[in-house]
Each structure stands twice: as C-alpha cells, then as structure tokens.
Amino acid sequence: MADAVKRADVLEWDKTRTQAQQHTAGRKLEEATVSEIKKSRAALKKWADDETAAGMAEV
C-alpha cells in the first residue's frame, strides 16, 4: 500500500507524461491496488471463518 501511495505521488509530478498518460497509469495503479485489497480481504475472511469454526469445534 505504501508503494502505491509513493507511485501515485511520483506520477502526479511526472512532467514526462501527458495528462492522458498520467490518467492511464493512475487507473492501472488503482486497479492493482483494489485487486490487492480484495485479496487481503478474502484472506482475512477465510482466517476469521477458520478461527470461528475451530472455536465452535472446541465447544
């Protein structure tokens, strides 16, 4: 996540790209970030479900 923030900051001040190129690069960065967040969310949900199941099995 910190890498994405750093890349977005650099992208904002990149004078070698046109606004359209910056927009396209920003969209790709956003898509990659959202994808990673979704993966993390799914992993956390699986962990929580596994912990819940393990706790219920002990009861």
Image (cartoon, rainbow, N blue to C red):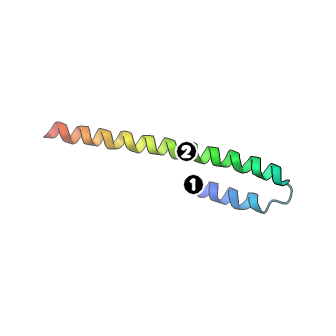
Percent across and percent down for residue 30 are: 64, 48
Q: Amino acid at mark 2?
A: Glu
Which disc number belongs to residue 36? 2
**Which numbered disc covers residue 24?**
none
The image quadrant that residue 4 belongs to is bottom right
Secondary structure under the numbered disc 1 in the rendered image? loop
Quadrant assignment for the C terminus: top left
Spot occupied by residue 7 in the image (x, y as percentages of width and height): 69, 56
The answer to which quarter of the image holds residue 52 is: top left
Tell me where residue 18 appears, x and y as whole percent.
Answer: 85, 53
Say if 38 sits above or below 11 in the image: above
- Name the residue located 82 percent from the left edge and 54 percent from the top edge: 19
Q: Which mark is residue 1?
A: 1
Amino acid type, residue under disc 1 in the picture = Met
- Residue 7 falls left or right of residue 21: left
Q: Residue at x 69, y 57 (%)?
A: 8
Contact, mark 2 vs mark 1 (Cβ under 8 Å):
yes
Comes first in the chain, label 2 or label 1 = 1
Q: Secondary structure at mark 2?
A: helix
CA neighbours of label 1 inside 10 A, class few (<14), some (14 to 19), many (20+):
few
In the displayed structure, 8 sits above or below 36; it is below
